[in-house]
Amino acid sequence: MLDATTPPLWLSREDLQRLVDALRAQGRRVLGPVVREGVLRFDEVRSIGELPEGWSDEQAPGRYRLTHRKDDASLFGVVSGPDSLKPHVFAAREPLLQIEMDAGSGPGRPFRAEPIVPDAEPLALLGVRACDLAGLAVQDRVFLGDRFVDASYAARRARLFLVAVGCTHAVATCFCASMDTGPAPRAGSGYDVALTEIDGGFVARAGSDAGAALLASLAPGPAPAATLERERDAYAACAAGMQRSLPRESVRDLLFENLDHPRWDAVAERCLSCANCTMVCPTCFCHDVRDEPSVDLRGSVRVREWDSCFNVEHARIHGLDFRPHVRERYRQWLVHKLASWVDQFGSSGCVGCGRCIAWCPVGIDLTEEVAAIAANGAAQ
């Protein structure tokens, strides 16, 4: 559903450069999609000339490739790379607490523990996809939505300015339409400005007061009615053309009813338990916390770093590993992502971005696994 609460405006490519300049003038570092070593990554952008003009992506199970199309001058033709919004709010590794012994010696000497909250730099992320906005909303629920707020996450999240770009075409691994997370950025999904690249320019909508102020500073005109009609058709065609889907309404019960299905053994024969899927997933939040002592043993730093339920050590407690086999680890990941996540947080843990499919070295496709379980009913 397109945002009907703000009037759609029209930006030219020159206006997009002015938008980047205005964000930089606010003291923000602007990150956008750029091609680096054959992959789309989020990196600093000063000029729209650094965006991947004319590039597109081919994705399939275990396959990712960028291609350059001479007849296409789109700036945002590449749907996605391995990067989501997650690393910009939930750091892959960060200190949480500094612990120091006070002066003195002997047993029972006091110590000081000081939390370490990052001095987060103001960031503007350009080219955020609708599925990643949905992923960020899931992370917000995890880290901000309960009575225990994660201070490090909150510090980074508060300084983000998000410029979303809707998807007018999909790659073979996309299934956001079936998860109701795309392809168009949803009203109220957290963006400050949303863009649709079409007809050589951009339909722009504000999603926040800050976004409205930024667009007003550019003094754009209204988007032409004919362009808005083509925009609607493009989003509808994108959704209709997606080759994969998940049964969003029924998958929770399906998985809970099939915890002993033989398909778990079949997928375990292929799964490497490498954790690639959880690293690229925009919603996975498993982490490990450990204390790293100083050389003189008078202090330590408590550090948090990304972990994965696919790692053997993740399920090891007091010498007992309660998920010793790949079968149990894959089942834990998929059932949590699509079923128990709903009970825990009130929404699915999957946003349909398809990254776990493309970046799996052996091409395991979670939509295929769910379909295989569904095809055999409640197998015993």
Image: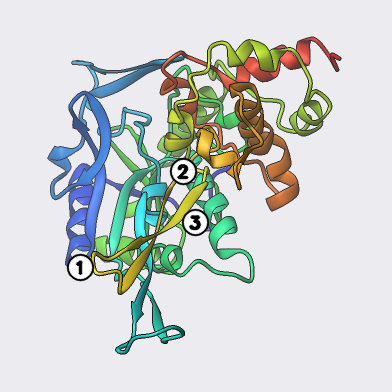
Q: Residues within 10 Å of mark 3 (few under 14, many from 20)?
A: many
Name the N-terminal-most of marks 2 and 3. 3
Which one is in front, 373 or 34?
Answer: 373
Q: CA distance from mark 2 to mark 3?
A: 27 Å
Residue pictured at 57% horizontal, 11% vertical:
269
Mark 3: amino acid:
Gly
In three-dimensional space, the C-alpha distance between marks 2 and 1, rounded to whole angstroms, equals 33 Å
**Where, by quadrant of the figure, is residue 165 drawn?**
top left
Eyeballing the image, is 274 above or below 187? above
Q: Specify whether 282 is left or right of 38.
A: right
User: Residue 107 at what x, y percent from top left?
Assistant: 44, 83
Badge 3 element:
loop
Residue drawn at x 30%, y 22% as measured from the top left: 56
> In this figure, which residue is indicated by the disc labeled 3?
190
Question: What's the amino acid at mark 1?
Answer: Gly
Q: Earlier in the sequence, mark 2 or mark 1?
A: 1
Task: Choose top left, top right, bottom left or bottom right for residue 83.
Answer: top left
Q: CA distance from mark 3 to mark 1?
A: 21 Å
Evaluate whether residue 86 shows in this view: yes
Residue ranking furthest to the front: 106
Circle nearer the viewer, 2 or 3: 2
Assign the C terminus to one quadrant of the image.
top right
Q: Residue at x 48, y 35 (%)?
A: 278
Q: Quadrant of the N terminus?
A: top right
Tell how many labels: 3
Identify the residue position indicated by label 1 in the image: 27
Q: Which residue is mark 2?
A: 307
